Image (cartoon, helix red, strand yellow):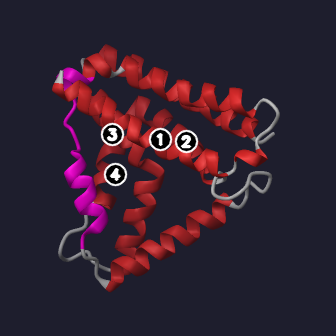
Amino acid sequence: MKRGAAFFLESNLFVLLILAILLINKNDWDEDGSTMVIAFISGFELLFMSLFVPACFFYEPVGIKRIIQSIFKKREKNEWIGMALAFSVITLFSLGFIFMPYPSNYLPLWLTVCWICAFVSIFIQRVVIVYYYSNANIENNQKSISNYFFKYVTYFIMGFNHYIQLLLSKMPFLLNKLFAIFAFLLLFVQCVIVLMIYD
């Protein structure tokens, strides 16, 4: 139960961050924007509730303390530059959604990439997980600007999907694939809904 509760708490902190991004641009919502936002948040809650029981057995909590430490840890110059470059590139791509205000325009870009990663994970889940670790984990001999750039781009485009797929990978094969397909379909619906909020 502690693992399931930790998964649900950490997942909902993530949802609160998304909700905050949406609320910043509340004045730009469509007439039915409030309904769409409720549907959008409910989609994530449906995913998290369906994964609660498996999480009780398979989830390895991230830990709030670890998250806080990673946010406030001392960073070297190359990491700051790599982070700034990653932020700039992601921002430039998000500006392609010109009909959406900033910073909400990050959401369709993020969801689209998550959806693609979720699709690939149905077939080659282990490869996607290993790819995430190879970019997200920086060793002592990999502290160049480009390494940090790919690290933070990977965090943005694959972070959410990685933790979901990591949980799924520990399940029996059939459950793994059923939940992987469900996550893929749900992310597609979430992409459509977030676009409808600002239609």
Left or right of 80: which side holds 19?
right
Contact check, label 1 and label 3, Cβ < 8 Å = no
> Quick one: label 2, few (<14), some, or many (20+) residues within 10 Å?
some
Residues marked 1 and 4 touching at CB (< 8 Å): no
Other-residue count near label 3 (Cα within 10 Å), few / some / many at <14 / 14–19 / ≥20: some
* Element assignment for label 4: helix
| Label 3 element class | helix
Q: Residues within 10 Å of mark 4 (few under 14, many from 20)?
A: some
Q: Are marks 2 and 1 in contact (CB under 8 Å)?
A: yes
| Above or below, 110 relative to 174 | below
Residue 71, magenta (yes or no): yes
Question: Magenta stretch mostly in which secondary structure?
Answer: helix
Task: Please name the residue that numbered disc 2 is placed on.
Answer: 19
Task: Specify the quadrant that holds the N terminus.
Answer: top left
Q: Quadrant of the C terminus?
A: top right
User: Viewer-nearest of labels 4 and 3?
Assistant: 3
Q: Which mark is residue 63?
A: none
Query: In this picture, which residue range is highlighted in magenta?
Result: 55-73
State the residue in front, 180 or 96.
Answer: 96
Q: Is residue 115 left or right of residue 160?
A: right
96 left or right of 60 in image: right
> Label 4: which residue?
131
Dot label at residue 163 = 3
Residue at 32% in and 29% down: 8
Q: Residue at x 43, y 72 (%)?
A: 83
Q: The residue tagged with tag 1: helix, strand or loop?
A: helix
Percent position of residue 143, x then y: 27, 77
> Which mark, by number, is residue 16?
1
Instruction: Give the mark, 1 or 4, whose residue is nearer the N terminus.
Output: 1
